[in-house]
Image (cartoon, rainbow, N blue to C red):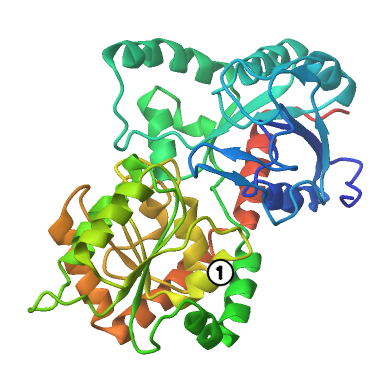
Amino acid sequence: MQPAARADAYRVAFLTSHPIQYQAPLFRALAASPALDLTVMFLSRMSPAGYYDQGFGVRVAWDVPLLEGYRHEFLPGAGAADRLSFFRPIVHGLTRRLRAGRYDALCVMGYGHIGYLRAIAVAKILGLKVFLYGDSNLEGWRRSRAILALKRFALPALFRMCDGLLATATPNRDYYLHYGVAAQKIFFFPWTVDNDFFRRAAIAAHADRDRFRAGLGLDADRPVILYASKLQRHKRPGDLLEAYARLASAGGGEPRPYLLFVGDGEERPRLERRTRELGWNSIRFLGFRNQTELPAFFDLCDALVLVSEREGVATIVAEVMNAGKPVIVTRAAGLAHDLVEEGVNGYFVPVGDIEAIADRLRMIASDPERAAAMGARSLERIAQWSYAANLRGLLAALDATVVRRS
């Protein structure tokens, strides 16, 4: 149960697709504020009982609480419970719920489902303030001329219907500005992770690092390069593998660092074939790992690498920074614009630049003191990117737009 809100608390409804491991702790943090009377509405029951994740290519059942600590309800509807599309599931009952809830504002977590668009229209009719939250950016996304034309027509109209746009990172803010949103309508509401959870879990994992490393069959004196994400083509894990191959010794022997791929997806067979061609034992494919398993890998690694050509926010960057690690990323990783400072707590590399990736791997792997110092800066930076910032941003949006009831 969430704490009782003050009598003068803002009554706010969030509408999102389904219970998501990244959003649940955010909702708990917001619900804990006496300044908010929070309700979360879900379009789908997908995820609490497990579902097939298309990106990972495996069935996923998250091992962290998804529905605890905040008031929530599932909208009635029809359609497959284990998948989402623009039109499915078909939900109903939203108008009645918004009217009965006497909300001050509705926060819609995206616009990629028809239910979101209906909700915005209904909320405006009912006189609610509407805030839109998303992770869209302009980095690396290729669209057809028809799609771009549709966006140029539809998105400004959609954004005008909203009383506030909640920017999750600088590229997301730039996206709204690109489509004509006035700067004063944009409120900073960062895409955050549960810093306390990941920090505590990484500290606990550190005490057991030697046993964990031995269980993976890794020598104690060799650096560890980590990839932890879906193995999808647009994330370009093959670029990392080829960059790693350039770290081979002069005689062609395997590099001194280990390379760990944590995750699953469409690219895994191709990556494994390439690894067999190299003939090295220093590359490991460890499959999908759940939320509570990841901090042990974060603690173990010397750096995380994510060299995608396009990303929304790249949540993994924020997660690993809570373990005090440097990151090597492309500018397609949305959060990296705000969380990574070149040469201070990480490095930016151009998309597809194998030699640049290899060069940064050498710098990290050959200088453990540099890696440790950069990791310490990561920990400092991520501490400011917290749920407290989300609460401040949401309250700023509410204060700027809601006329309080007498």
In this view of the protein, which residue sits in the foreground, 367 or 281? Answer: 281
Task: Determine which residue is flagged by label 1.
Answer: 295
Q: Nearer the viewer, residue 8 or 188?
A: 188
Task: State the residue at coordinates (54%, 48%).
Answer: 190
In the rendered image, the vertical position of residue 315 relative to residue 130, given as above or below: below
Residue 149: image quadrant is top left
**Helix, strand or loop at disc 1?**
helix
Q: Where in the figure is residue 392, as x and y percent of width and height?
A: 64, 49
**Front one among 378 and 102:** 378
Q: Quadrant of residue 295?
A: bottom right
Q: Residue at x 49, y 70 (%)?
A: 298
Q: In which quadrant will I find the C terminus?
A: top right
> Three-letter amino acid code at disc 1?
Pro
Nearest to the observer: residue 261 or residue 376? 261
Q: Residues within 10 Å of mark 1 (few under 14, many from 20)?
A: many
Could you say where residue 13 lies in the image, as x and y percent from the top left?
A: 76, 32
Q: Is residue 190 left or right of residue 152?
A: right
Q: Is residue 323 visible?
A: no
Q: Residue 61: image x %, image y %?
A: 67, 48
Extreme residue in the left direction: 250
| Residue displayed at 22% across by 68% down | 360
- Residue at 32% across / 86% down in the picture? 369
Residue 53 appears in the picture as rendered:
yes
Residue 133 percent location from the top left of the image: 57, 34
